[in-house]
Image (cartoon, helix red, strand yellow):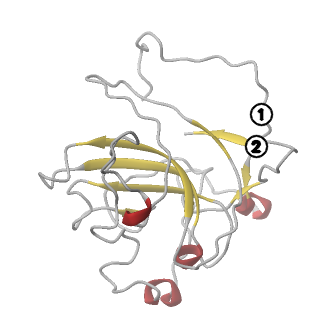
Amino acid sequence: MRPSYHPGGMYHNSNISTLPITQTWHQNGKCPKNTIPIRRTNEDDVLRASSVDRYGKKRPGSIPNISSINDPDTSNISSGHQYAIASSNVDKCHGTKATFNLWQPTIGNANDFSLTQLWIVGGSYEGNDLNTIEAGWQVYPNFYKDNNPRLFIYWTRDAYKSTGCYNLKCSGFVQTNNQIAIGGTLSPVSTYDGAQYDFDI
């Protein structure tokens, strides 16, 4: 159910017009009422993972601690990740929204990936009680077998140790929208010095 009221400051009205983004599977139809689209998983998908238990999960220890860019001891490159972040620490959060520009970056190595995401974090790595909810787009050839930008979600409740997964690969996330395929390709993509395509999470 939608909330009956919204705390102050929840809405940002922009005069910038954006072009619509769709999912390519819509070209073949829509899901009937009371059903959801689910991306098919085949044997080859599972075999690309280091194990059946690890399929659809991030590797423990592969997630960088978020540290200030001004911290001289912080080295994003040495941890295998290069990233830019904007963060906010709030005591009470009634919701959030992010608008992302959609691109299709070239990925040089199949094990590499590129993403833009909203990452909501609570807890800590040290206490092994890190909770995250992540959503956005990613280009991840090793996971999806192509170079298309795809809508993704991820969650964990124990600092990526044993819980959580991408998209609908494990229990823990219940999808109710029958118009959006989690893991589905997004299009069209923005072009340099050309049309720009945004979507909201």
Disc 2 to disc 1: CB gap under 8 Å = yes
Task: Indicate whether 52 appears above or below 153.
Answer: below
Task: Indicate whether 159 appears above or below 52.
Answer: above
Q: Which residue is the extreme one toward the right?
A: 194
User: Callout 1 environment at 10 Å: few (<14), some (14 to 19), or many (20+)?
Assistant: few
User: Callout 2 environment at 10 Å: few (<14), some (14 to 19), or many (20+)?
Assistant: some
Q: Which residue is the extreme one toward the top?
A: 8
- The CA distance from mark 2 to mark 1 is 6 Å
In the image, taking residue 76 as reference, residue 194 lies left or right, namely right
In the image, taking residue 92 as reference, residue 178 lies left or right, namely right
User: Which quadrant of the rendered structure holds the N terminus?
Assistant: top left
Q: Report the residue marked by disc 1.
A: 18
| Amino acid type of the residue that numbered disc 1 sits on in the rendered structure | Thr
User: Which quadrant of the rendered structure holds the C terminus?
Assistant: top right
Foreground pick, 181 / 105: 105
In the image, taking residue 105 as reference, residue 42 lies left or right, namely left
Residue lying at 31% horizontally and 25% vertically, measured from the top left: 90
Q: Report the residue marked by disc 2.
A: 197
For the image, the number of numbered tags is 2
Query: Which type of secondary structure does the marked residue at label 1 adopt?
Result: loop
Quadrant of the image occupied by residue 77:
bottom left
Where is residue 26 shown, x and y percent of the image? 74, 58
| Amino acid type of the residue that numbered disc 2 sits on in the rendered structure | Tyr
Query: Which type of secondary structure does the marked residue at label 2 adopt?
Result: loop
Question: Which of the two discs, 2 and 1, labels the residue nearer the N terminus?
Answer: 1
Foreground pick, 195 / 66: 66
Where is residue 51 shown, x and y percent of the image? 33, 86
In the image, taking residue 34 as reference, residue 4 lies left or right, namely left
Where is residue 99 shown, x and y percent of the image? 61, 36
